[in-house]
Amino acid sequence: MSFLVTGGAGYIGSHVVRAFVEAGLSPVVIDDLSSGHSSFVPAGVPFVAGSILDTDLVRQTITDYQVTGVVHLAGFKYAGVSVVRPLHTYEQNVIGTISLLTAMADGGVDQIIFSSSAAVYGTPHTDLVTEQTPSDPESPYGESKLIGEWLLADQAKATGLKHASLRYFNVVGSASPELYDSSPHNIFPAVLDALAEGRTPRLNGDDYDTPDGTCVRDYVHVGDLAVSHVAAAKALAEGRELEAVYNLGSGEGASNREIMNTIATATGIDFQPDVMPRRAGDPARIVASGAKAARDLDWKMRHTLEDMVQSAWQARQAAH
C-alpha cells in the first residue's frame, strides 16, 4: 500500500510520514515547502516538490507511485492570518482539496484521511466538545476546514469515497529531535523562541472565568496524533467503516499559566510572562473528548504535558 501524504514536509505531516514508515507502510510526500522543510522528509521516502493546486502533478504522482490512499495535511493553517487573507486561505484549503479529490478520482484512489481542525467549532458553549457539538467556525481557516469535510462527504455520496476527518486540537511536542514546530503563531514555539532569544514571553489575558484566570486549551502530542493517522489509514485499507469525523482531544485541559510554568521548569529558565490584554475572540476554555477516536483509531495520551514541553524544547534546541 502506497499513501500520498500531502504537506508531508511540515511539522505534523513529517511526523505522520515517519509513523507510516515505522508501521511498514509506504508514504510518498508532496509539499510546496511554503511552511514545510525538505529536511523533514526521511531519506528513502519519495518527495515531490509542488502544490496540490497543480492537479496534473498530483495525478502524475498518484500514477507514478501507484498510490492507493491519501493523507491530506497540506493547507494554509494560520487561523488569525486567514482573517486578513481569506482568498488565499480558500484557494489553498478549498480549491486545493478539490484539485486533490479530482486527481484521486481520475487515478481511481478512493481512500482519504483529512486533516481538519478544532477551529470548525468556533467558540463552543460546552465544557467538553464532542463530535456532536455544533460547528460554528469564526475564521476563514475554520470555515475552509469545515468545507473540506463537506467536500469529502459529498464526494463519498457521489463515488463511494472512503474517508475520515480528524479534528486536531492543540498539537505540540516532538517525536523526533530533528522535527520541530516552526509556526510563529503557536504558543509553544512562540514562548520557546522568546526565551531562547532573551525576551519575556507574553500571556494574553489573565481575567477569564477559569481556575487561574488564563485560557484553558486541549494539548495533544504530535507523536500520538501520528499513530492515529496510521490506524485510520489501515482501517480504510482493510475496508472497516469509520466515522466521518473524529476529535483528537485529551478530555482534559491545561491553562496558559500552567503551560508557562511547565516551560519554565523544562527549560530551567525562570520567568514571569508579561500579561497582555485578551485577544478578541479567544474563548475561556476548549477541551474535547477523544472517546470515539480511542475506540476506533488507537487514540490515547501517551505523553504528559511535561513530556510535550521537554520534547518541544529539545527539538528547538537541536534545530537552532
Image (cartoon, grey):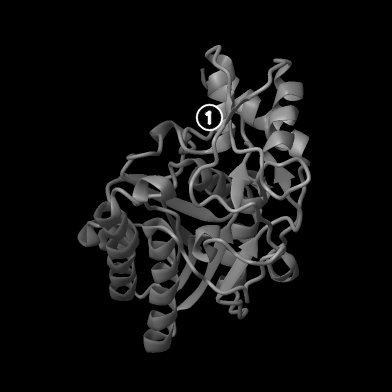
Residue 176 visible, this angle: yes
Residue sitting at x 63%, y 47%: 22
Query: Quick check: 56 above or below 244?
Result: above
Residue at the image position 51 percent from the left and 43 percent from the top: 279
Q: Position of residue 78 (x, y in %)?
A: 41, 46
User: Which residue is outermost to the bottom?
Assistant: 157
Viewer-closest of 77 and 180 = 77
Please say whether residue 234 is visible from this viewpoint. Answer: no
Q: Quadrant of residue 70?
A: bottom left
Q: As drawn, which residue projects farthest toward the top? A: 198
Q: Nearer the viewer, residue 154 or 267?
A: 267
Q: Residue at x 44, y 80 (%)?
A: 153
At 49% from the left edge and 37% from the top edge, which residue is drawn? Answer: 42
- Dot 1: element: helix
Measured as percent of width and height from the top left, residue 50 is found at 27, 47
Which amino acid does the dot numbered 1 rest on? Ala
Which residue lies under the disc numbered 1? 190
Q: Nearer the viewer, residue 315 or 239?
A: 315
Q: Position of residue 205 (x, y in %)?
A: 60, 38
198 versus 309 height, above or below: above
Establish if 209 lies above or below 197: below
**Which residue occupies the foreground of this view, 215 or 160?**
215
Residue 93, percent across and down? 34, 59
In the displayed structure image, the side of residue 197 where residue 101 appears, left or right: left
